[in-house]
Image (tube, rainbow, N blue to C red):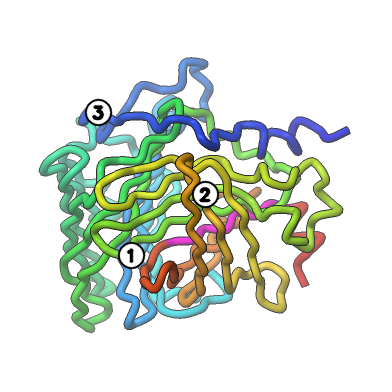
């Protein structure tokens, strides 16, 4: 019989459920989880990409309201990296004070000169970053191309943004003008326990201002992934956690996903994704994703995530976005080579 730690990865499927409608106040900080548990979490995730340079940038805030602290990170890298520290630029702090006056207009802390200003909630946000000592900085305007796609039941949304601005990378001046999908979660426990199961993947892609998608889930056992026999609790056709397709002004929930991940010779690093997404209206989207910039990051020590800038292809269109492959100890131990 599967244990709770095996089952809880896939027990909360929200496939086909109605998306939550977000309110302007969801842009800001929320109360801690009702249990009051110390693992209560709120996150804001931003970024940018310059595909012609195989360059990706990630900006991550992890708030711990019960502990009254937060974590902050900026990562910039080009191409395929074997380790986190081989990225062109990293600036990460685990332990910082919580913002005293909310996150509508704030500077993170003296340790990292990262600033956020909400110009219009859920629509327009400015981000500034300066590291004078290492000669890295950026100025980014994030403008929504769609309403937030709210996870069924609330506490989370994903939203495709147009990101414009400038990046200075060690004196190299680069223009930022593309799309990126941001993410915001709140009022949930995020316990850093080790779970037994296959990788789950958080995937987003933006093709243009009228076409974007988001999907979260594991490979389908029917595609014969290498882990199929080790994790029999994962059932074919039931690996989608939740997701949506935004097309021509309408955001439609996903009903199912058939996913297959192809990995490098190390057995871990993703190189290609094949997706078949079916929305609740029965429309099918066949999408292929080619990983072109990748780095591994241990978000916490019991988990490793491969952050992948991915070139998506669908119906003759080309788009870009993240595929974040989330791996636990049991998978890495048994399938890493």
Answer left or right for 336 relative to 238.
right
What residue do we see at 51% from left, 52% from top?
202
Q: Residues within 10 Å of mark 3 (few under 14, many from 20)?
A: few
- Give the Cα separation between the discs numbered 3 and 1: 26 Å
**Residue occupying the far right of the picture:** 1
Answer left or right for 133 relative to 251.
left
Q: Quadrant of the C terminus?
A: bottom right
**Label 2 element class:** strand
Q: Which residue is mark 2?
A: 278
The answer to whether mark 3 and mark 1 are in CB contact below 8 A is: no
Chain-order first, disc 3 or disc 1: 3
Chain-order first, disc 2 or disc 3: 3
Relative to 183, is 165 above or below?
below
Q: Is residue 131 visible?
A: yes
Q: Position of residue 294 (x, y in %)?
A: 50, 71
Q: Which residue is mark 3?
A: 23
Q: Which residues are magenta?
A: 322-329
* Residue 300 is inside the magenta segment: no
The disc label shown at residue 207, or none: 1
- Give the Cα separation between the discs numbered 2 and 3: 27 Å
- Toward the viewer: 150 or 325? 150
């Amino acid at each position: 019989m599967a244990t709770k730690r095996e089952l809880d990865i896939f027990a909360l499927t929200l496939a086909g459920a109605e998306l939550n409608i977000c309110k302007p106040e969801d842009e800001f900080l929320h109360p801690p989880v009702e249990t009051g548990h110390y693992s209560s979490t709120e996150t804001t995730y931003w970024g940018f990409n310059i595909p012609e340079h195989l360059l990706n940038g990630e900006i991550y805030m992890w708030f711990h309201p019960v502990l009254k602290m937060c974590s902050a990170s900026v990562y910039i890298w080009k191409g395929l990296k074997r380790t986190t520290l081989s990225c062109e630029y990293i600036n990460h702090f685990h332990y910082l004070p919580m913002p005293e006056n909310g996150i509508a207009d704030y500077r993170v802390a003296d340790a990292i000169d990262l600033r956020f200003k909400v110009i219009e909630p859920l629509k327009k946000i400015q981000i500034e970053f300066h590291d004078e000592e290492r000669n890295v900085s950026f100025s980014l305007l994030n403008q929504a191309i769609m309403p937030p796609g709210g996870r069924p039941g609330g506490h989370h949304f994903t939203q495709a943004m147009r990101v414009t601005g400038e990046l200075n990378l060690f004196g190299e001046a680069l223009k930022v003008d593309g799309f990126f999908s941001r993410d915001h979660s709140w009022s949930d426990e995020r316990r850093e326990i080790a779970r037994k199961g296959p990788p789950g993947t958080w995937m987003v892609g933006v093709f243009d201002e009228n076409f974007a998608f988001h999907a979260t889930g594991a490979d389908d056992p029917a595609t014969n992934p290498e882990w199929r026999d080790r994790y029999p609790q994962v059932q074919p056709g039931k690996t989608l956690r939740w997701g949506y397709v935004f097309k021509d002004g309408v955001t439609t929930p996903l009903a199912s996903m058939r996913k297959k991940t192809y990995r490098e010779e190390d057995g871990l690093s993703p190189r290609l994704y094949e997706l078949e997404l079916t929305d609740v209206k029965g429309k099918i989207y066949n999408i292929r994703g080619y990983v072109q910039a990748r780095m591994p990051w241990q978000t916490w020590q019991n988990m490793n995530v491969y952050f992948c800038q991915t070139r998506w292809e669908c119906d003759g269109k080309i788009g870009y976005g993240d595929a974040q492959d989330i791996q636990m100890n049991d998978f890495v131990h048994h399938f890493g080579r």
